[in-house]
Image: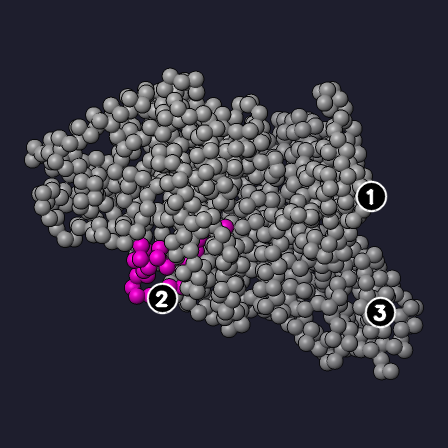
Amino acid sequence: MSRVVTLKINGQDVSGREDETVLQVARENGIEIPTLCHLEGLSNVGACRLCLVEVKGVSRLLPACVTRVSEGMEVTTHSERLERYRRMIVELLFSEGNHVCSVCVSNGHCELQDTAIQLRLDHIGMPYRFPVRQVDASHSRYGLDPNRCILCTRCVRVCDEIEGAHTWDIMGRGINSQLITDMHTPWGESETCTSCGKCVQICPTGALFIKGKSVAEMTKRPDFLPYLAMMRNRKNGS
Amino acid sequence: MSKKKIATIWMDGCSGCHMSFLDIDHRLLDLADLIEIVHSPIVDHKDFPPDVDVTLVEGAVSSDEDYEKILKVRARTKILVAMGDCAVSANVPAMRNRFTPKALQEAVYLAPNMANPQLPHGTVPILLPRVRPVHEVVKVDVFVPGCPPSNDTLFYVLSELIHGRMPDLSDKTRFGA
Amino acid sequence: MHLEDLHAIAQQQQEADSKLEHILYVCTGTACQSSRSEEVLKAIQAELKARGLEKKCAVRPGGCQGLCARGPLANLDRGKQLYQHLTPEDAPAVVEALDGEPPARLQLDKQLPFFTRQVRVATQGGGLIDPNDLNSYIAAGGYTALLDALMHKTPAEVLQEVVKSGLRGRGGGGYPTGLKWSTVAKAAPTPKYVIVNGDEGDPGAFMDRALMEDYPFRVLEGMTLAAYAVGASYGYIYVRAEYPLAVKRLQNAIKQAQKQNLLGSNIASTPFSFNVEIRLGAGAFVCGEETALIASIEGGRGTPRPRPPYPAESGLWGKPTLINNVETIANVVPILQHGSEWFARIGTEKSKGTKVFALSGRINNTGLIEVPMGITLREIIFEIGGGIPEGKKFKAVQTGGPSGGCIPEQHLDMPVDYDSLAQVGSIMGSGGMIVMDETSCMVDVAKYFMEFSMAESCGKCVPCRVGTAQMYDLLLKISEGRATLNDLALLEALCDMVKHTSLCGLGQAAPNPVISTLRYFRDEYLAHILEKRCPAGVCQMKPEVMEVHS
């Protein structure tokens, strides 16, 4: 059993287990820190940078999803600077893809859209990049619209870590990174995909969707994940 | 108190925002004593007048005509409002940005099933290479996202601006609303 | 192989050399090779043979002499005479003048400040070691440090020497090397690894390439000493595939060292075993970042991961791993040969030893130099570097590549050390030094480096992936005279945000070239924006029909 430590988050005294992250302890105490790449039940990659927090005595900003709590730590989750950075990160994401909320299957049920609202964004201050990206509709039940993809890699991780298929991965570098199935073959022709649909359910936006859904009809149900992860851990005896 | 001069313009959009504006309905009459609509697609007025207090802009900047229009409107308006997602984010009109204007025109005007396939010349505005949101071209003072923003939202925005207040829209509308 | 064997080999070599009247080392580094130095070498050998003088004079492949601008270079009788601009056709002239005076056009003045102001530690031997020949390295004192350590020192004693030397990481960060070693040494004795980072990718940097090409045995020996000190049994040298000569020479060095039992199982008949493997980088700059490099060795995508845990605790295959840059490792052997006190006397209080720099850009003496820390930029550029060509005016020097900054005239008298460079908004970096004169546009320079960072971003974290692309677009807009003051404000906001929110060093440092040029050359940005004019006359103005608001 790991030790219990006490720390301060936003001036509030809280306690957590030594092996917990700042994000976990904050959420247990009703303190909301925005995230997009994090999902309970999957490994953490610290890629979206939305959960960056200030820790007293540390000059760098630290991602709450991978930073362990420690005794006497003093964490600030919300400040003018953090909010500014978070807004810019979301603006960068909107400017990177082609996010047309009004005609998106996930309109109203989208974590990117929700985060924008939460951060009180009423427009995107970065020039839109309008990339050219092809939709993959080759799978019989699901579709991939990379115009809506934010490269959070949740699908990559759920497919690899939970389903064990590793159908998804990222190809290319930098601004040209893109989500692919197998060796960049159409999803419908994938030899590894089990069509389990986990990737669709945990995708934060409308990038992965069930075919036949119209505007705003695609609601996601990622709740299965923590249970699956828990059962797997039990089985592995950890 | 003199009446506030209000204008609306329509660029590259579906007119849904104007429909929503009209849906303000009888409440528009409540404002009648306070405002004067000096220019709008829904009133018959040719040129855009000077010294407008508030202009509601529907649509993205898509053609040479839009571009010239928005520069003139900006110069003649105190408070410029980007009304709806097309004005705010370029929205659906920007989905053509992946094609060149030439490819787009050929696909539309020279389609095999056209009765008399020919490219327009001089009769329609020239398409800009890219559709852009209004704030990428001129300064915007108030952003009202939504596709379209509800009549309640637009009524609220207008009422606040008429009374010299900046509207706080954070819990009233959003992208795609 | 024992110490006595080493001495015997060294003595044999010396005896053989003493029978010769002359020894000529021809530089066979990449730069001189590209101007036909191998042909020069063969031509001189053939000329000697034709005249029956092989027993009088030996011609050997050597390492970099530094002054690449004058290559191909050669060195006769340990610096008695230096040759420049050699061609195969010059072979008769060289051979005829062995005892006399070569033609003036071939003579390179050995009294140039370029040579006299250098202090050689990492490049000790001055290129007068045949990089293909273990015996040549042993004759120059090679492998005595390792065998002495294995026979007479505990790992802790070796580690202490490095700690006391004050050596700091030469890859850019400047982290104390001894501290890094201690952390790995303290970790539980599961398999541990030593990785030498030779993924040098900064534009204008070729220090590590030269060290690997010229002193492959020193890199191996240093690595083996590091492994002994921290308790590692396996090592990797991660070299970018764009350095084929370095790879070839390292491979050859590994083979020869294994043959002589200086690498492998029970080195020199001691209980200590250490094996080394070369891994080739596939052309990704980000793989110079240690966690991305580890991912690449493991066979995954070269993307970094958040630290902690640091590789010293959990690195390759999740095991404690020591990662050092090539130059850092190249300093280990001299430190153990001459002692930590000797090393600590060179350089400054907080930056001890020397630094190898690659001089390039608008400078007369393009090439490779090793200088003591604390030397001023002015001495490097105007004395050693010979100043700016064509009488042009100095404008700035860029250090640290895409992660560094541009330093203007006013800071030229500042000592070169980790902390001073950071103070003026640049970094020591790995040692690239690009000199710019009045014909360079600083907006264009910033744009160039941002394009590099954008192309080399791995794409994992949002600020670096999209932020570098947005910053590049803004710089392009400024350089073409299409930007407004609003764009400049957005650029500065992005610089601040990308610097503080990116996952790894690549993103965190990517805004530096912009920040430093804005700090010292803001007027150039403003000229592009407000006057639609490039003061240096570099940028082509392309004012757009559709102007954006200001």
Residue closest to the far left: C51
A198 in magenta = no
C401 in magenta = yes
Q: Are marks 2 and 3 in contact (CB under 8 Å)?
A: no
Question: Label 1: which residue?
Answer: A30
Residue C330, given in percent of the width and then of the height, sits at 39, 37
Question: Label 3: which residue?
Answer: B160
Q: Is residue C548 above or below residue C450?
A: below
C523 or A18: nearer the eye?
A18
C57 or A84: nearer the eye?
C57
Circle 2 Cα neighbour tier, 10 Å, few/some/many (<14 / 14–19 / ≥20): some
Question: Label 2: which residue?
Answer: C393
Query: SS of the residue at dot 2?
Result: loop
Q: Residue at x 68, y 33 (%)?
A: A43
Q: Is residue C203 above or below residue A165?
A: below
Residue C183, given in percent of the width and then of the height, sits at 55, 33
Residue A8, given in percent of the width and then of the height, sits at 77, 45
